[in-house]
């Protein structure tokens, strides 16, 4: 064990020196090239919205972020680099067109993991050590046909019955109190091949009264083996001045899928809020919805369950606040319980302290109680501290999680969906996390940050460490 600890320390020391050097050079030379602004006319863009033309410097706005991630567990380690870019243009072509995009570039700095490595993920499956991803890139055209309409062309997300990423078109039209939309194209995924799946859908939103909104949404997804039709109905209702109701009911392939009801009370004058919700998952889902939810490959058949949640908050003057809540999850048929589908009860209480003893500081103390048959039956404590010191924002804390995935970090989802050993993926149990973070403002638009976290659990590997070193700038 002593030899292993020594090797781990040496690996960390060597890796950090190499990464810090690369990262320092990266943030030193790349941002000025990409985002430096001068008064040269070459940096101004001739406006396309007036016949005579005009110029402005800030035609494109957005964010650029470069991040190094290091992970260590026992005698294994992994080192990756990520660059994120998000942008949006101002209106042009007579204030009718805007373009927006977001993407990521990744580099595997230490080569591919072995097939049985703890940190093997999708980055280790490519032929090259670098990979690019396009999250979205689309053009919005205002009023392409008639007034109060919008046409979106390109790669985009659709948020309705399901969250779907597709390459295609979406048309929206407002007609008085009625809003409608229709979309269609080729479905795409960041995590798995979609084999030329197609997707189409439509929806209508009606506001019959001032305090009432109803939505009806439909989506169809077609692949080689399945055709899935899903319909969702949503209702928002303001019951009283501070009391609101929300309800949702969805149907998948003629069978009821789930429903959710929620009551929310928000009393701003009292600095108080209360939310009560009930969710019911109605029928088993496995392969028939695999093209909507890829988690089936990992989690297996999703069985019916209930989830009741009650949470509340009350401010106690300017310096104190309390928050508490209860979650009760129950699998309908006890014989359907499995690793990823369990009964549990969770109760928590948080006490928040602001600017006491130290100015510009926040401390949150949390106590929670978990009751899960055969897994855990205990009370646990957590604390989070945050303090601003000039241009620095520092924080530290510890927290408890009954469940976490056995693979973690910025590539956690990819690890799950693309692992060649999905049969071996399991949950971490009884996870205690310790973390610290530091952010330094370089300018009003840019900062560098460091976050270190360590996890201790009952699942092998029992210890896990992660470091994130980031540079971010708005432009």
Image (cartoon, rainbow, N blue to C red):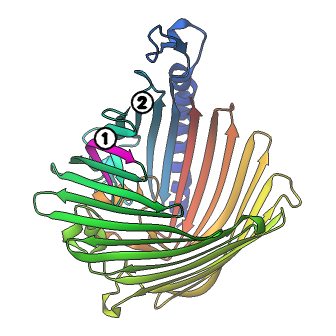
Instruction: Please state which of residues 427 and 260 is positioned toward the viewer in this rendering.
Output: 260
Tell me the mark number nearer the camera, choosing from 2 and 1: 2
Q: Please tell me in which quadrant of the rendered image residue 337 appears.
A: bottom left
> Residue 145 at x, y = what percent?
30, 34
User: In what element is the residue under mark 2?
Assistant: strand
Relative to residue 83, is residue 251 drawn left or right?
left
Work out which quarter of the rendered image holds the C terminus and state it: top right
> Residue 43 at x, y = what percent?
52, 13
Q: Is residue 435 above or below residue 165?
A: below
What's the magenta bit mostly, secondary-structure-wise? strand
Identify the residue at horizontal 15%, vertical 51% (top origin).
195
Of pointers 2 and 1, the one earlier in the residue sequence: 2
Q: Is residue 250 above or below residue 465?
A: below
**Magenta-colored span:** 164-175
**Residue marked by disc 2:** 98
What label sits on residue 75 in the rendered view?
none
Marks 2 and 1, how far apart at CA: 14 Å
What label sits on residue 155 in the rendered view?
1
Q: Residue 170 colored magenta? A: yes
Identify the residue at horizontal 41%, vertical 73% (top origin).
427
Relative to residue 17, is residue 405 drawn left or right?
left
**Residue furthest out toward the left:** 224
Relative to residue 158, is residue 1 drawn left or right?
right
User: In what element is the residue under mark 1?
Assistant: strand
Q: Residue 134 colored magenta? A: no
Instruction: Please state which of residues 301 and 268 is positioned toward the viewer in this rendering.
Output: 268
Relative to residue 35, is residue 158 drawn left or right?
left
> Residue 376 at x, y = what percent?
52, 86
């Amino acid at each position: 064990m002593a030899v292993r600890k020594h090797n781990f320390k040496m690996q960390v020391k060597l890796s950090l020196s190499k990464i810090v050097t690369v990262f320092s050079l990266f943030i030193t030379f790349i941002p000025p090239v990409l985002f430096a602004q001068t008064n040269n006319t070459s940096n101004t863009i001739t406006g396309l919205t007036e016949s005579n033309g005009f110029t402005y410097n800030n035609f494109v706005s957005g964010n650029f972020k470069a991040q190094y991630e290091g992970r260590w567990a026992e005698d294994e380690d992994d080192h990756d680099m990520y660059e994120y870019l998000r942008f949006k243009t101002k209106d042009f072509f007579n204030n009718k067109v805007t373009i927006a995009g977001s993407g990521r570039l990744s580099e595997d700095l230490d080569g591919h993991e072995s097939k049985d490595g703890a940190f093997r993920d999708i980055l280790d499956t490519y032929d090259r050590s670098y990979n690019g991803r396009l999250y979205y890139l689309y053009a919005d055209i205002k009023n392409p046909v008639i007034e109060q309409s919008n046409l979106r062309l390109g790669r985009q997300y659709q948020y309705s019955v399901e969250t779907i990423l597709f390459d295609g078109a979406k048309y929206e039209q407002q007609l008085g109190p009625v809003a409608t939309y229709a979309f269609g194209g080729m479905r795409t995924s960041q995590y798995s091949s979609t084999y030329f799946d197609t997707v189409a859908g439509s929806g209508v939103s009606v506001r019959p009264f001032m305090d009432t909104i109803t939505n009806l949404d439909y989506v169809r997804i077609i692949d080689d083996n399945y055709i899935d039709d899903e319909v969702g109905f949503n209702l928002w209702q303001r019951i009283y001045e501070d009391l609101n109701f929300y309800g949702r009911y969805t149907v998948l392939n003629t069978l009821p899928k789930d429903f959710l009801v929620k009551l929310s009370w928000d009393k701003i004058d009292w600095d108080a809020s209360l939310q009560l919700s009930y969710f019911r998952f109605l029928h088993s889902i496995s392969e028939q919805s695999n093209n909507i939810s890829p988690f089936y490959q990992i989690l297996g058949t999703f069985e019916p369950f209930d989830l009741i949640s009650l949470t509340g908050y009350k401010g106690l003057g300017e310096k104190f606040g309390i928050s508490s809540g209860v979650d009760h999850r129950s699998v309908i048929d006890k014989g359907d319980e499995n690793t990823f589908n369990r009964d549990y009860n969770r109760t928590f209480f948080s006490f928040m302290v602001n600017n006491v003893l130290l100015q510009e500081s926040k401390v949150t103390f949390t106590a929670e109680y978990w009751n899960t048959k055969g897994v855990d039956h205990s009370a646990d404590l957590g604390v989070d501290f945050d303090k601003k010191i000039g241009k620095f924002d520092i924080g530290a804390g510890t927290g408890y999680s009954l469940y976490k995935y056995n693979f973690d970090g910025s590539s956690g989802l990819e690890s799950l969906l693309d692992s060649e050993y999905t049969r071996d993926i399991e949950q971490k149990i009884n996870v205690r996390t310790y973390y610290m973070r530091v952010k330094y403002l370089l300018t009003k638009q840019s900062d560098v940050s460091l976050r270190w976290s360590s996890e201790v659990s009952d699942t092998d590997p029992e210890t896990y460490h992660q470091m994130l070193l980031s540079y971010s700038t708005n432009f």
